[in-house]
Image: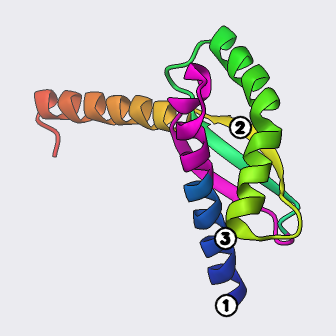
Amino acid sequence: MQSRVIQQKREAFLKEIINEVFSSLHNEELNTLEIVDVRCSRGKYSAKIFIEASRLSKTQKQNIQKEFKRAKPFIQSSILHASKWFNAPKLILCFDSALQRQNKLDMIFAQISSERDDKGIA
């Protein structure tokens, strides 16, 4: 239980640092991204950064990956500076479309609900 709390604190800390670094970059592709979640391995060897991707096209995703690869050393050094860790985790950028899927499900449920109301089914 205690290790899970430590893991969650570490992930929240990384999310905060990465948000700050992204917003400080002079790169329009990266500084406007919305970070949804950060998942860190137990030993801090790797960290997956999940960004909201529901409004991004395929070419935008490719450009973001390219710019992220260029900015990765700066991001890692910023993490090292802020955290005072011995090594920075290997950063992996992941596109998360869970919000888009959730919105589609909400629309489907709303449609079912309205059809039930129209038919008078309780």
Residue 62: quadrant of the picture: top right
Relative to 99, 13 lies left or right: right
Residue at the disc numbered 1? 2
Q: From the viewer's side, name the closer residue of 115 and 7.
A: 7
On the image, the x and y values in percent for residue 68 come to: 74, 30
User: What residue sits right under mark 3 in the picture?
Assistant: 10
Number of other residues with Cα within 10 Å of mark 2, as a class: few under 14, some 14 to 19, many 20 or more:
some
Q: Earlier in the sequence, mark 1 or mark 2?
A: 1
**Label 3 Cα neighbours within 10 Å, binned few <14 / some 14-19 / many ≥20:** some
- Residue 74: image x %, image y %? 76, 41
Q: How far apart in space, not on screen, are marks 1 and 2 (Cα)?
A: 28 Å
Of the 4 image quadrants, the one containing the N terminus is bottom right
Residue type at tag 3 = Arg
In the rendered structure, which disc, 3 or 2, sits on the residue that comes first in sequence? 3
Please tell me how crowded label 1 is: few (under 14), some (14-19), or many (20+) other residues with Cα within 10 Å. few
> Percent x, y for residue 47?
77, 54
Q: Residue 62 bears which disc, if any?
A: none
Horizontal placement of 44 versus 52: left or right?
A: right
Residue closest to the eye, 79 or 48: 79
Circle 2 sits on which residue?
A: 94
Marks 3 & 2, CB-CB < 8 Å contact? no
Instruction: Look at the picture and state if 52 lies above or below 66.
Output: below
In magenta, the rendered stretch is: 18-43
Q: For the view shown, which residue lies furthest in the bottom direction?
A: 2
- Identified by mark 1, the residue type is Gln
Residue located at (49% from left, 20% from top): 55
Q: Residue at x 58, y 65 (%)?
A: 12
